[in-house]
Amino acid sequence: MNLELDEERTAVRQLAKDFVDREITPHVVEWDRAEDVDRGIVKKLGALGFLGLTVEEEYGGCGGDHLSYCLVTEELGRGDSSVRGIVSVSLGLVTKTIAAYGTEDQKRHWLPRLTAGEALGCFGLTEPGTGSDAGSLTTRAVRDGGDWVINGSKMFITNGTWADVVLLFARTNDAPGHKGVSAFLVPTGTPGLTRRTIHGKLGLRGQATAELVLEDVRVPESALLGPEGKGFSIAMSALAKGRMSVAAGCVGIAQAALDAAVGYAKEREQFGRSISHYQLVQELISDIAVDVDAARLLTWRVADLIDRGQDFATAASKAKLFASEAAVRAANNALQVFGGYGYIDEYPVGKLLRDARVMTLYEGTSQIQKLIIGRALTGVSAF
Ligand code: FAD
């Protein structure tokens, strides 16, 4: 793995950094308090190519590599995890999955709009009764003539109330476990699909997390994505790459925590000197710095494996596990450096901690990542 960023990637990172500093950072407190980011951000992300980074150019993407995707995601995570999540879900989980498994018609219909930010995608796997055990989902799609009729509900769906299309996973036959699950592309305007925003989240408050209810939602045969019965493996392959994106977002959180902690420690004076003079404060800062570097290296390694066409799934679980726990630690250490000021939202570190906390939960909890890594090492599934 070459750790030096070449000119092109340095430029991509700088583009993302400038965008974050100009369009995101000045608004994060306001968006967090309002529980809503400015929705115009989606078109801006599309205009810069951030919603099509790794998609082929013929479908409106930039044809970029996964390291560039990591760099942009890190920067967005440094700015606001709510905005980072919009990209990770719409591009990472939906657009890329359509690009990988879609028919030519599905690709031509959805990809140019999704990559331009004219449409947004959401990923509907989790249900009220099935989280970690996603393969047991109960939303059902039944054939009716040339159509599919879908009934069920989905929980905690990122981008849910904003999205134009749901990549929806539903049971299409009674084969045991996950074998009967299929994937569908369901436009959110389809009659019978209702959406409710979930309020009161600890973090990611700017993000439109939703519950979806499907009552006799009718879609044509052409809405099926990939072969019938392959939906679960499609979902798992999307999530494996998605974990790299979550990990990169966590690197961004940890980097933001480091920048804030160093800046504050140099300014804040107690006992006649800036608190940066105290060894225990330096310990907090150096712990954050080590977490940033370690999380970044694990994450870039996943990008490198993907870009070289190597097996990356276990590495992605390791990166997601470590980076998410590291982001929580880093934000918590930064809050300690800020003392009481860290506890109020005029200062950035409290939000970093609230946003970081969910990273250990979604796209597979830390426990589930450990089971994936353990299975790869021992050959024994302990789920
Ligand atoms: P559970 O599965 O009920 O787990 C509860 C606890 O039990 C956890 O600690 C877990 O680690 C542990 N546990 C479960 N099984 C085992 C086991 N076998 N061994 C050891 N421990 C175990 N889902 C989507 O489909 N799309 C989205 O866009 C999306 N966005 C989300 C956004 C937010 C803000 C949140 C909070 C969630 C989102 N999710 C989304 C859902 C998320 O992926 C699930 O919350 C997650 O998979 C965990 O499921 P659960 O919450 O039902 O917890």
Image (tube, helix red, strand yellow):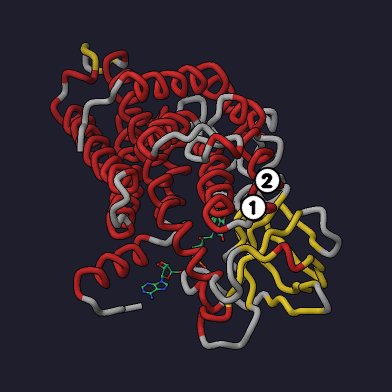
Q: Image check: 103 left or right of 279?
A: right
Q: Nearer the viewer, residue 28 or 383?
A: 383
Q: Nearer the viewer, residue 152 or 312?
A: 312
Q: Residue furthest left?
A: 279
From the top left corner, tell me how far across and down residue 9 is, in percent. Answer: 36, 25
Q: Secondary structure at mark 2?
A: helix
Q: Image check: 155 left or right of 366?
A: right
Residue 301 in the image: above or below residue 213: above
Q: Quadrant of the N terminus?
A: top left
Q: Nearer the viewer, residue 268 or 197?
A: 197
Residue 290 in the image: above or below residue 233: above
* Disc 2 from disc 1: Cα separation: 6 Å
Q: Badge 1: few (under 14), some or many (20 or more) residues near its Cα, within 10 Å?
A: few
Residue 132 in the image: above or below residue 94: below
The residue where tag 2 is placed is 108
From the top left corner, tell me how far across and down residue 139 is, in percent. Answer: 67, 74
Mark 1 and mark 2 in contact (Cβ < 8 Å)? yes
The residue where tag 1 is placed is 104
Q: Residue furthest right?
A: 191
From the top left corner, tell me how far across and down residue 196 is, in percent. Answer: 74, 55
Q: Quadrant of the C terminus?
A: bottom left
Residue 321 position by quadrant: bottom left
Q: Nearer the viewer, residue 378 or 291?
A: 378
Tag 2: residue type? Arg
Q: Is residue 53 visible?
A: yes
Tag 1: residue type? Glu
Number of numbered discs visible in the structure rendering: 2
Q: Secondary structure at mark 1?
A: helix
From the top left corner, tell me how far across and down residue 274 is, in percent. Answer: 24, 14
Tell me: is circle 1 under 8 Å from ligand 1: no
Tell me: is circle 2 under 8 Å from ligand 1: no
